[in-house]
């Protein structure tokens, strides 16, 4: 049996592409309703869980920084309340890339 080294290397290189090398202009952030006050945002990379209520919005993960305006627009379609909390599940850029832009927003 021949080893599949070329495939493994190609996959590893593809996964290692930095966010700056990606084109986010064509990405559409879609809102997927889950339940009352809960939705999922689908864009590029990991999905975002959104919990929204009478007082604020809570995000689980936040995708890539260049997508933050599109993410904000999607969140605004669910609630006029501000994003008060962002929980990052792990360090990958598609889960934490927009953490800094959210931190700079006024409450």
Image (tube, helix red, strand yellow):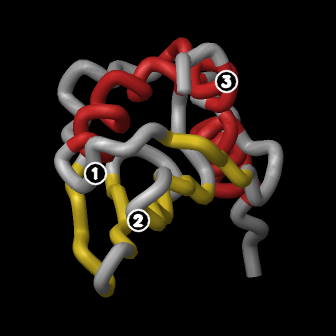
Q: Residue at x 44, y 38 (%)?
A: 82
Whether 68 is drawn above or below 36: the answer is above
Front position in the image: 11 or 93: 93
Sequence-first tag of 1 and 2 = 2
Measured Cα–Cα span from mark 2 to mark 3: 20 Å
Residue 27's x, y, as percent?
A: 25, 35
Mark 2 or mark 3, whichever is nearer to me:
2
Sequence-first tag of 2 and 3 = 2
Q: Which residue is identified by label 1?
A: 79
Q: Which residue is identified by label 3?
A: 103
Q: Residue at x 66, y 31 (%)?
A: 99
Whether 69 is drawn above or below 53: the answer is above
Q: Secondary structure at mark 3?
A: helix
Location of residue 106 (image quadrant): top right
Where's the N terminus, which quadrant? bottom right
Q: Which residue is identified by label 2?
A: 53
> Can see residue 84?
yes
């Amino acid at each position: 049996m021949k080893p599949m080294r070329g495939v493994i290397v190609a996959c590893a290189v593809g996964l290692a592409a930095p966010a700056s090398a990606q084109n986010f202009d064509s990405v559409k952030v879609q809102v997927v309703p889950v339940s009352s006050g809960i939705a999922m945002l689908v864009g590029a990379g990991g999905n975002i869980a959104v919990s929204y209520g009478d007082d604020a919005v809570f995000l689980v993960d936040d995708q890539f920084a260049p997508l933050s305006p599109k993410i904000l627009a999607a969140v605004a379609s669910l609630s006029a309340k501000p994003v008060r909390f962002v929980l990052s599940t792990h360090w990958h850029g598609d889960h934490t890339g927009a953490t800094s832009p959210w931190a700079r927003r006024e409450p």
